[in-house]
Amino acid sequence: MHSMARRCCRWLLLLPLLLGSMSVGWTAPERQNIVVWGVGLGPDTKGDEARIRAFEKKFPQYRVKVLSMGAGAMDPQKLMTAIVGRVPPDVIYQDRFTVSDWASRGAFRALDDLIARDAPTDPSTPTPDKYYPAPWNEASYGGKVYAIPDGSDDRVLYYNTKVFAENADKLRAAGLDPDRPPRTWSEVLAYSKVLTKFRKDGTLERAGFIPNYGNSWLYLYAFQNNSSFLTPDGRTCTLYSEPAEEALKFMIAGYDILGGYAEAQKFQSAQRGNADDPFIIGNVAMKIDGDWIISSLARYGPNLEFKTVPAPVPDDRYYKRGRFKDEKDQFITWIGGFSYAIPAGARNVEGAWEFMKYVASEDGYRIAMAAQRSWEARRGRILVPKIMARKSFNEMNLNDFAPKDPRFADALRTHVSMMPFARIRPATPVAQMLWDQHVRAIEFACLKNLSPKDALKQGQDVVNRELDEIYSADKYPVVDLKVPAIIGTMGAVIGIVLFVAGYKRQRIGLLGRTEARWAYLFLTPWLVGFFVFTLGPMLASLFFSFTQYNVLSDARWVGVKNYQELFHDEQGLLKKAFLNVLYLGGIGIPLGLITGLAIALLLNQAVRGMRYYRTAFYLPSIVPTVATAVLWIFILNADPNRGLINGIWHSTIQAWFGTPPPGWLSVEQWAKPSILLMGLWGAGGGMILWLAGLKSIPTTLYEAANIDGANPRQAFWNITLPQLTPLIFFNTVMGLIGSLQTFEVAYVITGGNGAGPSDSLLTPVYHLFRNGFAYFKMGYASALAWVIFFIALALTATQLLLAKKWVHTEGKL
Amino acid sequence: MGAYGGQALTPELLYILGTLATWVGWVLTFKAASATFRYLFKSPGVNLSDLQRGMVLNGLGAGALLLLGALIPKELGRTVDAAGARFPLVWVLMPWSGWAAVACAGFAILRAFQTFTAITSEEQRKKLIGVPIWLVLCAYFWWLTAQQPGTVSVFRGGIPMSLNVALGIVALAIATLAAMAWISRKTTSRGYGKTVASHAALLIGSLIFGVPFAWLVVTSFKEDKDIANATALHWTPYITVMDKYEDPDEPNFQGKFQNSVVEGSIIAKLPDGRVRIDINKPMAMRGTTFEAFPIELKQVPKEVPEVTGTYNSKPVKGIAIKEMEDGSRKVLIQSPPDLKGTVYTALAKDVENVRKVGLRWQNFTDALDYLPPDTQKGLVYLKNTMILVVMSVIGTVVSCTLVAYAFSRMQFYGQNFLFLVLLSTMMLPGAVTMLPGFLVFRTLGWIDTLYPLWVPSFFAGAFNVFLLRQFFGSIPMELEDAAKIDGCTYLGTLWSVMVPQIKPALAAISIFTAMGAWNNFFGPLIFISSPDKMPVAYAVQLYNSSRGGEPGLLMAFTTMSIIPVVLLFFLAQRYFIEGVTLSGLGGR
């Protein structure tokens, strides 16, 4: 009875809506857009495309707009900016381990209500029982579901049986069985030692096992060693623990066998892909990797002899002793994968949910797989299905879509069989940060810049600070952002009133007043711009620097905490960032000046061909920075077969002196010189300026010098250079401010991920950008902005003071 | 452990001394050779006995020093093995601080020497002060170097001495000596030498500056397998030779789908009379299917690669008509004539595509085809950039002219103060106002629109105002006064009298604003997320991050993105050069 009444009520409520929608339907039969980010439409996603078309056919009221470039999971900054800027997509295909991150900031919409609403009526609704627990939990946060898991890649050990067979004698000599794969950490190291081969010059020819090649990271090894990077309550990061340290030490030991991490990196970057993939051609004997590589093995390695087994585990775990005595699972894997979520503020939630349900349904999956398979067949390839988070999908994969070739089908089966033993990265608001810090720790420890313990501890401190900030936000008072806005406006009004008063008090005639009024009118554009885009934001940023504010939630007043963090906790990072730009500016500016001046001096002598030379030298400087960076990344490729510079180096310097070419952008010491080199290419811009400067020096000065018997060298040092000092000064000042703000090059080279090898490309503005626009840590970023401002101010002031000593002004600067 | 006042003479020092000896030895060798050359060819006005002495002394010195250098023990130094005779080269490998120390020591010695040769006592004092300063610096740098033990080593290698190398070195030496002699003779008489030398330097320099460009252009015409998976660098682009082929089993049809002409084969006949076509051209649409009535389609021949292979251990030429699932290919033999028409299946590695030198223009069309459908093959990027460029230029020119005119030609209360404020904003790093600026635009609802990228230019940037003010200052007052007497308003005067006078400056400002708008990357990065609102500069980065695996396409796209800028430069070269000169700044 009760429910009956409620249903009636619901219908009554729905009636006007229904009528309304019908009338809308009559007037404008427009289809609603569902904007989806992160799903790329390309040759490898024909299945997705077919599924989208099938969805549109089934639900003709919707039109799916898919954006893949620059949007979606690959670029968290874009998504965050879109959500904060209130223009989010309707569906986002998101890396699952970061879902909790976004959810905790209120950036995603919880899906529980939609699931609860549709589960009873629609059997295809994704519910927890249809999924493996690990991926489902990964997509949940704080007891709520925020995303629907899609793929679920797990990792196993791939080993090249041919390499094993060829080295059977050596393996036997070392007491190892060539017919079975390593099962424990110590075994894999022993195998690696035998299978690793060096060339005569000491470089790697074949790597037995590279700990972090393929896809394993520290996560896998740490999970195997039963360490978790977070306490169960999620409030404390335990990146450092003895098991984790042990796992990291295992990785280092693995690299030591290969001659060190740097050597292994060099080896990796010299490898090529596709048919020349190092695993396929036997340059890497064993690797831990995800299921996605099977399809490329199937495509490029038709003759490859390989097998898959669960990844080797710590010896104690394998033999069930010590800490692992009561352990149930002998082998462990970890999974990642993607999922579909609805960002907060999405305009078409219903459509988005309908789309997500369809994608997660068996019908949808079957259509996608069938379409992908027929496409692969048409282009002459074999379809290898991916491991999925939904159990029934994997059954479908094995039964209906498995490749015929037993090698690949077996590999797929190994992957599926490991799914119940999968661990996930903890669901936490700091998932991305934890990941970034763990990557940093691996790099620093493996390069032996830090001990494993210190590297892990450093990362742990960073993450813990962030956790503290999140969980202790409540203790800081909320500030109403209207208050500073009102104060600011009042300040501006008072300023204007004072100004007007001053203006009124002036004793000038009518003519003067008319002129002044016209002048103010003319100045209006600048004045408005100054208040709205310069002074206002400046003060606002000063205010924000004392708060904790992520735009989506309330701002909280934290006092000088942001500055404290900058100068105390993250002092090393800050120092590194500023030292990097100091390096770039300190070497780059003089280098650019000297090169430009040298060309100009030469050009000043050669009269004929002036136009040609000028164009040739100047043209590179007008190429857009992004295009320059893209081009130079390509030219500076470390592989002599691809990179122009290393190619030339290889056939000249290396051939003559044996000095191998540098790794340029992939090596810490060479990353910044690479940028300097790019900058030098644009030195022609300065050349024009010097040319003009040289031409403006009065010839009488030279004539006088000539009479006094000065030689050209003396004339240069005593006339040319002093006459050019004002120009040099101006360019140094602007150049320093410019190099302090280096950003684009670093961004394009790193692609917005990380900050180059060992943070060698971290610049203050890049750091600011990441904190400001990727995490929307407005407070911290504003504090950093002010630090940059003060340093720029100090540098400029110093230069102005020093200028008196060396700039030749002739009265006026 | 040697006992030099308790200090060990480090092996490193020994190496460095030995290396220096070798270097100086080479210089002396060169001098001796030069003296010999001049002795043999007797330049006029040269004292022959001086030359003789030079030959002997330099030769002896060279021999002694080279011998000394050769005595450096080999164990610690890095050597490069090469069989047979080598043209020896010795170099000290040490960090930059080591080199700085050596340079400082050199300066210290130089200053000490100058102290001795100085004439006046004041000059002597001046030079003497330098000595300890350089020594302290030297010590500091050496200490820095010593902090990193084991970083100093000597590199001993050489260019393997083949006949070619030997001949080359001899030829080079003779050419250099001759050139030097010729230049020295000409310089003293007419100054030709200098011209020749500077032209040579300029030519080489401009070639070096041009190489990256050339590489960019060449690469954008290459096939991907010559770039990404190459086994060697090469400059010549090759293309696969394609042939037309009418496939009797699987005829190829041309039709229209989503407003573009596509080709493909029929994979199914539908009950309603339509057929389903699987697209194979253009590349970006491959694998997509669509339905059409047969009447809408036109049969056209397929394009298939020409290949060479072996059939029954006989070399054959033919065309690869189909790629099979396992990677093998079906080949239709065309020659030799007796096998013509035979079809056989070959493993992928047993057939080679026939290739010829040529330009792959398809990279450019493919690059555009791969862009998201919303962008109309990149035209939308161009349109967005044009909006930015035009609006920014209009905004900058209008607002800056007004403001600069007010500052330079009008009297008003607060003039100096406001101008100072304006100037100081020039030094303000953009980082400070970035975040709140974003919030301002968010409040306005302008995120993911082009407004945040051009509207600010209507509010007069400090630098351009400063520049125009200087320019206004150089126009004689009389012109303006005359206009005022004729009854012109301020705006009228500005428009009809002043603006025509500052046209070159406005042109320069326009060009730099346009370049800035074209290059703007940070703005779109923050404000734009939809592909149909992105400008070109940002699209390049997107292309880089999403299709970096296809360098041919990436380079083609990059080339296309810079063509307009380069064109603009060639069309308005004069204003560019003038603009740089006026603004006192480089291009960026």
Image: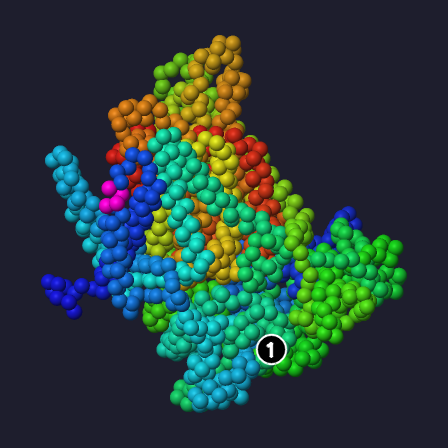
Q: Dominant secondary structure of the magenta stretch?
A: helix
Kind of residue indicated by mark 1:
Leu
- Above or below residue B304? Residue B511 is above
| Residue A358 showing in the rendered view | no
Question: What stretch of residues is rendered in magenta?
Answer: B49-53
| Residue A640 showing in the rendered view | yes
For image coordinates 43% across by 86% down, the residue present is A315
Under tag 1, what secondary structure?
Answer: loop
| View extreme (top): residue | B485
Q: Position of residue A88 (x, y in %)?
A: 58, 54
> Would residue B52 be counted in the magenta stretch?
yes
Q: Residues within 10 Å of mark 1 (few under 14, many from 20)?
A: some
Q: Position of residue A182 (x, y in %)?
A: 49, 85
Q: Which residue is mark 1?
A: A304
| A58 relative position to A101: left or right | right
| A183 relative position to B14: left or right | right
| A2 relative position to A497: left or right | right
